[in-house]
Image (cartoon, grey):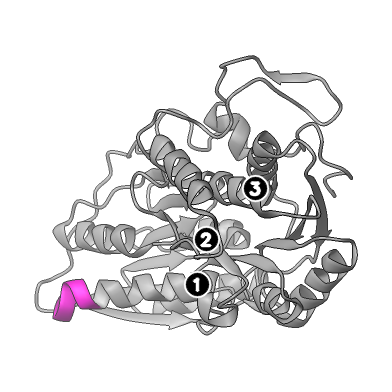
């Protein structure tokens, strides 16, 4: 998510190294560790990763034993916890936040027989695999809904950190809101945290004060949805459905479904077929799901949004298809041209029409 020019997901999103890891002895369960940046009760990002952990237990039963550590800050603490998980005998470790990237690589070098999986990163090794979801596909869909539903023509966006994943999402949502509503504007507030309900609520309030009648977010708590509910406005669930926190406000949601991936990778470890690979899945693979549409969305808008999701899933449409200019008006994608993955994975610019600058 910072500059990716070197490796990334270069040749193939599923290219694997030749190195395979031996199956642990059948007399002992495969030990699988998870490290989380937030609490499993955040009802967003970490909650959904933990649902994936529980799915591993459910699918593989006594052949696996899982453990997790929550609320681990990105940085030195992450390296310490990853080391502890490896020393505790975990054969497979999932690190579920971008800022764990360098700690994963460092620890993996010390434990070459342990399999590591890093979410949303781009650095790999023989025993380090990477995986992420094409969240921007879901943001194109909810951007379309937002563009149709706003009455003030102002959409607020609570953003976490100015990394490519977040910038991609803002661009995708804006492009598709603008397609259906040329008068739409986005207001963006950066909170520089993944999970801080108070900051997220304050950001949503600030956006509402600027005239936003629909709130989007790329943060982990349901606070923005709750704030929209309190104010009688609309919002979208992030990472999980979040309907219970805004039964009237929530129009739809982007749901992260990690379960199939986690089960498949744990099974590969059990089978002795695990290999380092780079996975970037979207709506088609089921890693990105669109939450149920609220009855508040007119039938024709629901149909339009569903048609877009179906076209993306079928590979008939890509959310970053030209003509698209960069914010300064310079051409980026020509008419019909589709953005390549390398550019998307390193995206550090806004598209034309968005206000403000991407923070450093």
Q: CA distance from mark 3 to mark 2?
A: 42 Å
What is the secondary structure assignment of the residue under circle 2? helix
Nearer the observer, disc 1 or disc 3? 3
Q: For the view shown, which residue lies furthest in the front direction? A: 299
The answer to which quarter of the image holds residue 229 is: bottom right
Q: Position of residue 92 (x, y in %)?
A: 33, 66
Question: What residue lies at 47% left-to-right and 57% top-to-bottom?
Answer: 118
Q: Nearer the N terminus, badge 1 or badge 3?
A: 1
- Badge 3: residue crowd in 10 Å (few <14, some 14–19, many ≥20): many
Give the label on residue 199, or none.
Answer: none
The answer to which quarter of the image holds residue 48 is: bottom left
Say whether marks 3 and 2 touch (CB < 8 Å).
no
Q: Is residue 17 above or below residue 27?
A: above
Q: CA distance from mark 1 to mark 2?
A: 7 Å
Q: Nearer the viewer, residue 131 or 107?
A: 131
Instruction: Please say whether residue 89 is one of the residues in the magenta stretch.
Output: no
What is the secondary structure assignment of the residue under circle 3? helix
Say whether marks 1 and 2 touch (CB < 8 Å).
yes
Q: Looking at the image, can residue 1 be seen?
A: no
Q: For the view shown, which residue lies furthest in the left direction? A: 27
Q: Which is the main secondary structure of the residues drawn in magenta? A: helix
Q: Position of residue 6 (x, y in %)?
A: 59, 32
Q: Position of residue 315 (x, y in %)?
A: 38, 31
The answer to which quarter of the image holds residue 13 is: top left
Residue at the disc numbered 3: 148
Q: Position of residue 257 (x, y in %)?
A: 39, 62
In the image, taking residue 85 as reference, residue 97 lies left or right, namely right
Say whether marks 1 and 3 touch (CB < 8 Å).
no
Residue at the disc numbered 1: 82
Give the label on residue 104, or none.
Answer: 2
Question: What residue lies at 49% left-to-right and 42% top-to-bottom?
Answer: 304
- Tell me the magenta residue range: 58-63
């Amino acid at each position: 998510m910072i500059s990716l020019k070197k490796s990334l997901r270069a040749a193939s999103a599923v290219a694997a190294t030749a190195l395979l890891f031996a199956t642990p002895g059948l007399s002992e369960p495969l030990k699988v560790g998870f490290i989380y940046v937030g609490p499993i009760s955040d009802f967003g990002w970490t909650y959904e990763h933990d649902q994936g952990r529980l799915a591993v237990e459910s699918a593989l039963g006594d052949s696996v034993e899982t453990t997790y550590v929550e609320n681990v800050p990105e940085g030195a603490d992450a390296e310490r916890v990853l080391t502890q998980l490896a020393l505790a005998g975990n054969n497979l470790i999932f690190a579920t936040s971008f800022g764990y990237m360098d700690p994963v690589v460092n620890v993996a070098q010390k434990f070459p027989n342990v399999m590591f999986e890093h979410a949303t990163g781009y650095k790999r090794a023989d025993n380090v695999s990477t995986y992420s979801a094409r969240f921007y596909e879901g943001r194109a869909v909810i951007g379309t809904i937002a563009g149709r539903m706003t009455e003030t023509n102002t959409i607020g966006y609570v953003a976490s950190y100015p990394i490519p994943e977040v910038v991609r999402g803002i661009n995708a949502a804006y492009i598709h809101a603008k397609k259906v509503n040329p008068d739409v504007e986005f207001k963006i507030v950066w909170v520089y945290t993944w999970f801080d309900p108070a900051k997220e609520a304050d950001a949503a309030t600030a956006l509402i004060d600027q005239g936003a009648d629909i709130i989007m977010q790329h943060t982990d708590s349901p606070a923005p949805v709750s704030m929209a509910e309190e104010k009688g406005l609309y919002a979208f669930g992030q990472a999980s459905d979040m309907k219970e926190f805004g039964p009237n406000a929530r129009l739809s949601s982007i749901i992260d479904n990690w379960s199939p991936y986690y089960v498949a990778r744990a099974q590969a470890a059990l089978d002795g077929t695990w290999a380092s690979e780079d996975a970037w899945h979207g709506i088609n693979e089921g890693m990105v799901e669109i939450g149920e549409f609220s009855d508040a969305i007119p039938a024709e808008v629901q149909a339009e949004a569903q048609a877009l999701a179906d076209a993306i899933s079928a590979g008939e449409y890509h959310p970053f298809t030209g003509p698209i200019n960069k914010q300064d008006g310079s051409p980026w994608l020509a008419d019909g041209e589709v953005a390549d993955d390398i550019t998307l994975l390193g995206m550090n610019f806004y598209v034309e029409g968005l206000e403000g600058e991407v923070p450093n």
